[in-house]
């Protein structure tokens, strides 16, 4: 069986280079190209292997995502919401598997991804880590089991450079909790508190976002009841876990019908 040809959007960034390394060391797939945003003249045209410390591969960093989507089996995308929405249209046009790890995508962006998934297999997850996706499943189960009198609070911490808050993973955990409780997430989510807020409103799912240092990603879901507290926590020690999950998703999606999938589908959860 031929190797799956995989490209990387945003290949010169920290996450992009981890994806390049993970593809290179994973059996059954082959690195087939990478793109960066126009104007990044320090990396455009450079050999992708040399840029990533893998030696010369004969693959040049380009700025034409349309060409990349047309010639590969799958594209891994941990870029920006604006770039990802351009890429998802290319995935739909070419029927290319698109694995999306980009965070900060709004409701309109989500609708665009859902529409594109009618023509391509798209794996979109707030977090590609196997452990985090197990956590999502556990949060849904615990929320469904516990009495609604247990207050739900989600606390996340990331490095000082992260630009969106709460994190996509934290929001995913909130949606899992809301699903478990059988309530609409948008009506239950309380993303910020400031000043004289009054007593906590029953049924709300609270969020707290911390930023500092070089923290890769910590997420805790707290179920606080009278007399006891249950805490479910995942701590990421490195970003390689996201790269491993993304490559696994790209391989899993080969031959799947067009549709919108998540890492929970990939893992069979």
Image (cartoon, rainbow, N blue to C red):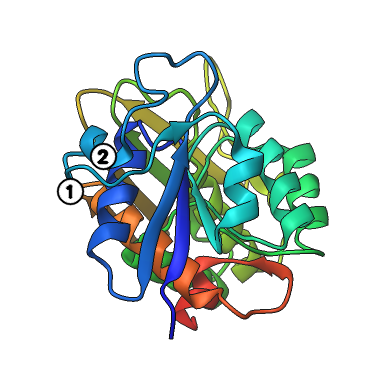
Q: Residue at x 36, y 60 (%)?
A: 129
Q: Residue at x 45, y 70 (%)?
A: 4
Sequence order check, earlier mark of 2 and 1: 2
Q: Quadrant of the rendered structure where residue 80 is?
A: top right
Mark 2 and mark 1: Cα distance apart in space: 6 Å
| Marking on residue 237 | 1
> x, y percentage for residue 242?
34, 54
> x, y percentage for residue 180?
60, 70
Q: Secondary structure at mark 1?
A: loop
Viewer-side residue, 167 vs 225: 167
**Side (left or right) of 180 relative to 170:** right
Viewer-side residue, 234 vs 99: 99
| Marking on residue 216 | 2
The N terminus sits in image quarter: bottom left
Mark 2 Cα within 10 Å, few/some/many (few <14, many 20+)?
some
Contact, mark 2 vs mark 1 (Cβ under 8 Å): yes
């Amino acid at each position: 069986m031929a190797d799956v040809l995989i490209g990387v959007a945003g290949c010169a960034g920290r996450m992009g280079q981890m994806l390049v390394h993970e593809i290179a060391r994973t059996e059954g797939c082959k690195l087939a190209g990478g793109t960066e945003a126009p104007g990044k003249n320090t990396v455009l045209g450079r050999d992708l292997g040399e840029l990533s410390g893998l030696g010369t591969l004969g693959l040049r960093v380009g700025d034409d995502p349309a060409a990349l989507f047309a010639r590969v089996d799958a594209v891994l995308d941990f870029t920006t919401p604006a770039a990802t929405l351009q890429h998802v249209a290319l995935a739909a046009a070419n029927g290319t598997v698109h694995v999306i790890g980009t965070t900060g995508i709004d409701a309109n962006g989500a609708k665009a991804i859902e529409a594109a998934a009618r023509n391509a297999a798209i794996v979109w997850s707030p977090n590609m880590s196997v452990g985090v996706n197990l956590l999502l499943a556990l949060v849904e189960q615990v929320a469904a089991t516990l009495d609604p009198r247990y207050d739900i609070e989600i606390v996340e911490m990331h490095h000082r450079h992260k630009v969106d808050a709460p994190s996509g993973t934290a929001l995913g955990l909130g949606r899992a909790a809301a699903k478990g409780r059988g309530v609409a997430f948008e009506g239950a989510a309380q993303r910020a508190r400031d000043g004289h807020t009054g007593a906590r409103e029953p049924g709300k799912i609270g969020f707290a976002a911390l930023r500092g240092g070089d923290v890769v990603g910590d997420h805790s879901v707290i179920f606080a009841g009278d007399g006891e507290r249950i805490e479910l926590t995942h701590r990421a020690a490195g970003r390689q876990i996201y790269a491993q999950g993304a490559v696994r998703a790209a391989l899993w999606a080969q031959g799947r019908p067009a549709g919108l999938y998540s890492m929970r589908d990939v893992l069979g959860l």
